[in-house]
Image (cartoon, rainbow, N blue to C red):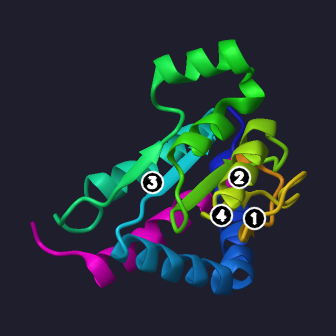
């Protein structure tokens, strides 16, 4: 084992978190406001990504339907990478690049908030999913790394200032949790 690896990772993480807190704060607070307004109006959250980003999309949905900091009413949310039957059907019949676009076309409505997670900013299926969401007049949020979103635009692009996938995902998780804090405070009713 290489000595100091843990301390080095934590120090690097702390640097990325600090730069993210400063650089992403205003946009992250805007997203919190949009989420609160959308959920208050009876709209839903749709989230998707690949690999670790797919699990983060599921994590966000779990926090909204389940609970975060308090036991409260569930909020409508769906992760588009969670249903293996749907995922394999679309990938097989329409191509993996259309995996999220096809589902967004079926499920998104104006006023919904659609999250696309892509650490590289280049995942074709995420880019296409966000593009269709914009066409459906949903609010689009891209969570990316330093490269930003490549090949599409989103209403909000939160580009973590790092090229290290682990650090990008760590900050994405922190953003999701702070959004849940805002939602719980604004809309949470004890269940």
Nearer the observer: mark 3 or 1; the answer is: 1
User: Which residue is disc 3 drawn over?
Assistant: 60
Q: Earlier in the sequence, mark 3 or mark 4?
A: 3
Query: Marks 1 and 4, how far apart in space?
Result: 6 Å
Q: Earlier in the sequence, mark 1 or mark 4?
A: 4
Left or right relative to 51: residue 81: left
**The disc label shown at residue 141, or none:** 4
Query: Marks 2 and 1, how far apart in space?
Result: 7 Å
Residue contact between numbered discs 3 and 1, judged by CB atoms under 8 Å: no
Q: Secondary structure at mark 1?
A: loop
**The disc label shown at residue 130, or none:** 2
- The vertical placement of 140 against 125, above or below, is below
Q: Earlier in the sequence, mark 2 or mark 1?
A: 2
- Category of crowding for the residue at label 2, using alpha-carbon neighbours closer than 10 angstroms: few (below 14), some (14–19), many (at least 20): many
On the image, the x and y values in percent for residue 70 come to 20, 68
Quadrant in the picture for residue 44: bottom left
Q: Which residues are magenta?
A: 166-191
Q: Quadrant of the C terminus?
A: bottom left
Q: Earlier in the sequence, mark 3 or mark 2?
A: 3
User: Which residue is disc 1 drawn over?
Assistant: 154
Residue contact between numbered discs 2 and 1, judged by CB atoms under 8 Å: yes
- The vertical placement of 188 against 59, above or below, is below
Q: Secondary structure at mark 4?
A: strand
Residue contact between numbered discs 1 and 4, judged by CB atoms under 8 Å: yes
Q: Earlier in the sequence, mark 3 or mark 1?
A: 3
Query: Marks 2 and 4, how far apart in space?
Result: 8 Å
Residue at image coords 66%, 70%: 17
């Amino acid at each position: 084992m290489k000595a100091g690896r843990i301390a080095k990772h934590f120090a690097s993480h702390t640097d990325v978190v600090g730069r993210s807190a400063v650089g992403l704060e205003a946009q992250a607070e805007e997203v919190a406001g949009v989420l609160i307004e959308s959920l208050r109006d009876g709209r839903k959250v749709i989230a998707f990504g690949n690999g670790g980003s797919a699990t983060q999309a599921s994590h966000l949905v779990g926090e909204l339907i389940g609970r975060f900091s308090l036991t409260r009413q569930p909020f409508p949310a769906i992760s588009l990478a969670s249903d293996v039957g749907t995922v394999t059907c679309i990938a097989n019949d329409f191509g993996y690049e259309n995996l999220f676009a096809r589902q967004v076309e079926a499920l998104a409505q104006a006023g919904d908030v659609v999250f696309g997670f892509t650490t590289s900013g280049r995942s074709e299926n995420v880019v296409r999913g966000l593009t269709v969401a914009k066409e459906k007049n949903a609010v689009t949020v891209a969570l990316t790394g330093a490269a930003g979103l490549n090949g599409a635009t989103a209403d909000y692009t939160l580009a973590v200032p790092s090229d290290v996938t682990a650090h990008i995902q760590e900050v994405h998780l922190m953003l999701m949790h702070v959004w849940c804090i805002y939602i719980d405070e604004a809309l949470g009713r004890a269940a």
